[in-house]
Image: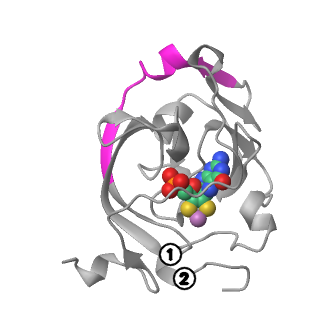
Amino acid sequence: MDVDPARVPPGQYVTRDFPVLSAGPTPHTPLDEWSFTINGAVDEPVSWPWEEFIALPRETVTADIHCVTKWSKLDTTWTGVSVDTLLAGVETDAGYVTAWCDGGYTTNLPLEDLIGGKAWIAYEYGGEPLEPEHGGPARLLVPHLYFWKSAKWVRGLELRDHDEPGFWETYGYHNYGDPWKEQRYTGD
Ligand SMILES: Nc1nc2c(c(=O)[nH]1)N[C@H]1C(S)=C(S)[C@@H](COP(=O)(O)O)O[C@H]1N2
Ligand SMILES: [Mo]
């Protein structure tokens, strides 16, 4: 494959496939039971049912994604709602976020890494509804960090004053996960 090596972080290889990596079974939450919630260290939790969520301003973004198991996929295209849009009007002093999901998966990030046009709640991939195996109806997309931070089946963001490791972070994955610094495991 003809790829610009400058786009591939250290230790990664580029694939055209889209592997599925899930720590458990794929949840199938009906859309009429689905909502997206911002909770935790906020004055007022806020929640959008599916129809309201997809009526929010949407963005289509093309990004390279990097899995800690060493595959990278270039020029993936997603449509969703930017986290900036979701946090507009939310008052918080929180510095950290736990993304929480159907099925119980969690991952933690600094709030800083979710704002400023760096993260989305994506519900389309390649112009089609996001497939359940890849996190549909909606997943977090944080392409600048290893892909385990891009929580599938995401249902909410809990804002936090203190950082708290999520699922893989508890099992020895790096707390931050910058692919360009090869922050794969604790201590990297
Ligand atoms: N809810 C949930 N999100 C998840 C995971 C998971 O097991 N459960 N796996 C993570 C990991 S390790 C990776 S590499 C990507 C894989 O996304 P994909 O299956 O769409 O390739 O999802 C991340 N998000
Ligand atoms: Mo992963």
Q: Amino acid at mark 2?
A: Glu
> Can you say whether 162 is above or below 51 in the image?
below
> For residue 13, what is the image quadrant?
bottom left
Residue neighbourhood size for the residue with mark 1, other residues' Cα within 10 Å, grouped as few (<14), some (14–19), many (≥20): many
Q: Position of residue 143 (x, y in %)?
A: 45, 59
Residues marked 2 and 1 touching at CB (< 8 Å): yes
Residue numbers of the magenta segment: 46-62
* Residue 81 percent coordinates (x, y): 44, 34
Q: In the picture, which quadrant includes the C terminus?
A: bottom right
Q: Residue at x 48, y 49 (%)?
A: 119
- Residue that mark 1 sits on: 179
Mark 2 to mark 1 CA distance (whole Å):
5 Å
User: Which kind of residue does numbered mark 1 sit on?
Assistant: Pro
Marking on residue 29: none
Furthest residue toward left: 2
Residue drawn at x 50%, y 22% as measured from the top left: 53
Residue 175 in sight:
yes
Residue drawn at x 28%, y 83% is: 5
Disc 2 marks which residue? 182
Specify the quarter for ligand 1: bottom right
Q: Is residue 46 left or right of residue 54?
A: right
